[in-house]
Image (cartoon, grey):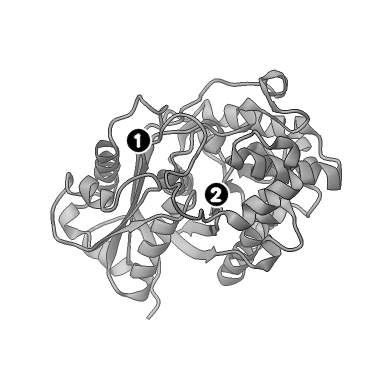
Amino acid sequence: MSQKTYVAGVGMIPFVKPGTSGTYIEMGSEAVRLALKDAGLSYELIQQAYVGYVYGDSTCGQAALYEVGMTGIPVINVNNNCSTGSSALFLARQAVESGAVECALAMGFEQMQAGALKSHWDDRPGPMGKSIAIVDQLASDAADLPMALKMFGGAGREHMEKYGTQMSTFAAIRAKASRHAANNPLAMFRKVVSTQDVMNDQVIWPGVMTRLMACPPTCGAAAAIVCTEAFAKKHSLRTDVVILAQALTTDKPIAFEPPSMIQMVGFDMAQRAAQAVYEKAGVDPRDIRVAEMHDCFAHNELLTYESLGLCAVGEAERFVLDGDNTYGGQVVTNPSGGLLSKGHPLGATGLAQCYELTHQLRGTAQARQVEGVNLALQHNLGLGGACIVTLFGRG
């Protein structure tokens, strides 16, 4: 029996640079305490927990939650690359919706190291072999750059070559992120930069990317408590935010054949997930007024406008230049500042997006508040691959 799933409480700590945070145990437990306080709920009433992180040993989730309470509940650790936080939320929502439990916790954290992402396993095949083969074929001129940068930068360059998109458009997306983050006390970078500042920053890939167009390694944690309507009423919890639809997709052959950097970084996954969500909820993308999306690079935010159907394929540059991605335009994208300015602690990102959109729907986002929000869209992407699109609405 399918039941509606409500977001009863959310918690998030400030995102910070590697080396300046507490441990993952401290960060994760604090995010959970904040979510419990927001919900007005005791940890003893949580029936299952799903904990997401990418860089850590097994059962790190238990280590963090044991600081909050040792109630003997099932704790499931989740790793789905950069979509880990939303994967934890997906599982928690699924448990509630299916009737397996009445109340579940999703939490994510990351205690990251400085520098580019890298594998810590060099004695076995990596999971990105198919993707790396395409990068080697289509971005051979960037051989010395970090892999994630080559993947998303190469996808942005492909869009430039196909549709005439200018590098300055990616810079405008980054500048927009900084303006939004200036109003977010939990964001790591709150300094406002202009499009020209971004263009004048250190060039990483000539003609494709400057340093400011890439999100930084980040430490942080966030959490969400989801429950049934009956459980919420029994414990006097809020029911003003509901998960209307959610989809998790993985790659199809189009991601690798024919070779395309745009498809390889998840365009089709996002497109299918978004279509499934719109169909289930009975909404049109033109109904969306606020969205948190996976802007790990400014290039990917531009691609995501198209994959989510916020604009037609090939029209993302016009979407940006017309101001349709910010306040006063069609849809406010990443009011939190996004990964580019708020930061990207891999396991926490999806739940930080949930935190932002919950406050947008409650009307408690303060200076970031988008007017007239009834629907809020979330997009969280992990290469390898997994893409989660979630539609939240007013309960």
The amino acid type of the residue labelled 2 equals: Val
Q: Name the image quarter holding residue 48.
A: bottom left
**In this rendering, is residue 148 above or below 211?**
below
**Label 1: how many Cα within 10 Å (few below 14, some 14–19, many 20+):** many
Residue 128, visible in the rendered structure? yes
Residue appearing at x 67%, y 20% in the figure: 201
Secondary structure under the numbered disc 2 in the rendered image: loop
**Label 2: how many Cα within 10 Å (few below 14, some 14–19, many 20+):** some
Q: Name the image quarter holding residue 204.
A: top right
Task: Give x and y (percent) for residue 146.
Answer: 59, 36
Name the side, left or right, on which 318 lies relative to 241.
Answer: right
Q: Closer to the camera, 144 or 173?
A: 144
Residue 310, visible in the rendered structure? no
Please tell me whether mark 1 or mark 2 is closer to you in this view. 1
Q: Which of marks 1 and 2 is nearer the N terminus?
A: 1
Secondary structure under the numbered disc 1 in the rendered image: loop
What residue did someone put label 2 on?
373
What residue did someone put label 1 on?
13
Task: Give x and y (percent) for residue 192.
Answer: 59, 21
